Amino acid sequence: MPVRAKNATKYVVLLGDGMGDYAYDLLDGKTPLQAARTPAMDRLAACGELGLTNTIPAGFAPGSDVGNMTVMGYDPRAFYTGRAPIEAASMGLALGPDDVAYRCNLVRLEQQDGRTVMADYSAGHIETDKACALIAKVQAELGSPKRRFEPGVSYRHIMVWTKGKVVEQSTPPHDILGQAIETHLPQGSGDEVLLALMERSQAVLEGQQANSIWLWGCGKMPQLPSFLETFGLSGAVISAVDLIKGLGLLVGLDVPDVPGATGYLDTDYEAKVAYALAALEQRDFVYLHVEAPDEAGHEGDLDKKIRAIEDFDARVVDPVLAALPQLGPHAVLLLPDHLTPVRLRTHAAEPVPFVIYRSPHARPRLAQRYAEPDAARTGVHVEQGHTLVRRLIDA
């Protein structure tokens, strides 16, 4: 029988998606984390354990699915089956044991020099109402008893293929911005079905803000032990993103819908903090996820990424740290799930900086900031990132 934590300590993961990065000449040789004003995160770094960790196991593509599964305390090598089924869980979609879910992006393709190019993986961060209307159109024209298109949030949607095929290769569209799509199309068993659906969708969506679907990230529903069974803690996940919410649901955490949470720079940070603190009043653990730094990295915009990092620090980390003492003893894990370098406009698998802080060590002990070079200089390297939650609890 699972048991709750034996003490009243509250545990918090503060995750700035993709906020790790590289150094840039435009920033005088600094990374965005170094260039940003981040007094709250720097305070944690000065008071806690700072180091590097691997969130992407060898052989896995760097992505938020693998990275967040790792940070949540589950080894992807044992549990990962694909991205789309995790998002399907968040959307309440029932999958049979032989059903396959595919992520279905609404994208914008363009013709350049006789080639078809991935111009925008998000169709201009299409609004959810508009996107759902387009997915309804796709379902009406392309849906069938074996394949159905389910609406999600903004550009992120799901196709469920009953007793379907799992293709061996499917490329995330955010990995090929500005590139010709021909060498990145799905390949493997069942690819002829996917290619036909993608091609036919272009006629269905002609003249729309999104002019094609893109199918990728397939898999069957994973089976994960509950967070309570694994760590002895009750908890909640606060996120705008179906992927993260799905992971929370799959491990038995509460996943409230936060009004105004968008997964972009315009998200309601204050609402997310309020929901996180309310959850901590009744539970032991909260996983608070913010997507905005990752989206800025995909856009290749240094200014937006620095703004997203500063917003995360001032509007999430700082108010959470200010409120936690009122809830009693607490421990905080701060980190990204992976790097999303502005230079690459996609994810990278290098180690990420982390901090573990445990109250009541409130006074700075070390002259260091929360940034990649400072984390590297400590010499602390946790090879397996999925052990960090246990390290947080046992700190």
Image: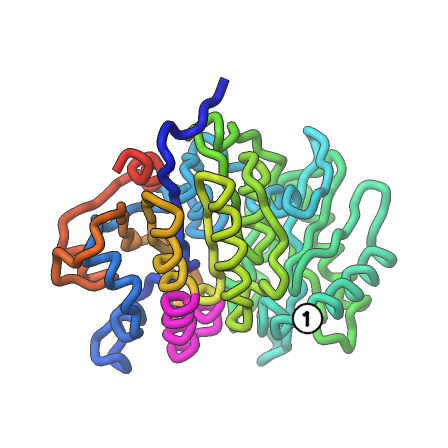
Task: For residue 345, say whether it is visible.
Answer: no
Identify which residue, 296 or 311, lies in the foreground. 311
Whole-percent x, y for residue 394 in the image: 28, 34
Q: Residue at x 58, y 80 (%)?
A: 113
The residue sitting at 39% across, 42% down in the picture is 10
Q: Position of residue 252 (x, y in %)?
A: 56, 35
Image-based side of 341 in relation to 176, left or right: left
Q: How is the image coloured?
A: rainbow
Q: Is residue 13 above or below residue 303?
A: above
Q: What segment is highlighted magenta in the picture? A: 295-315
The stretch drawn in magenta includes residue 299:
yes
Along the horizontal axis of the image, is 127 left or right of 79? right
Question: Which residue carries the number 1 mark?
Answer: 127
Residue 278 locus on image (x, y percent) = 52, 51
Q: Residue at x 24, y 61 (%)?
A: 43
Query: What's the amino acid at mark 1?
Result: Glu
Name the quarter where the C terminus is drawn. Answer: top left
**Secondary structure beneath label 1:** loop
Residue 1 falls within the magenta-colored stretch:
no
The quarter of the picture where residue 152 lies is bottom right
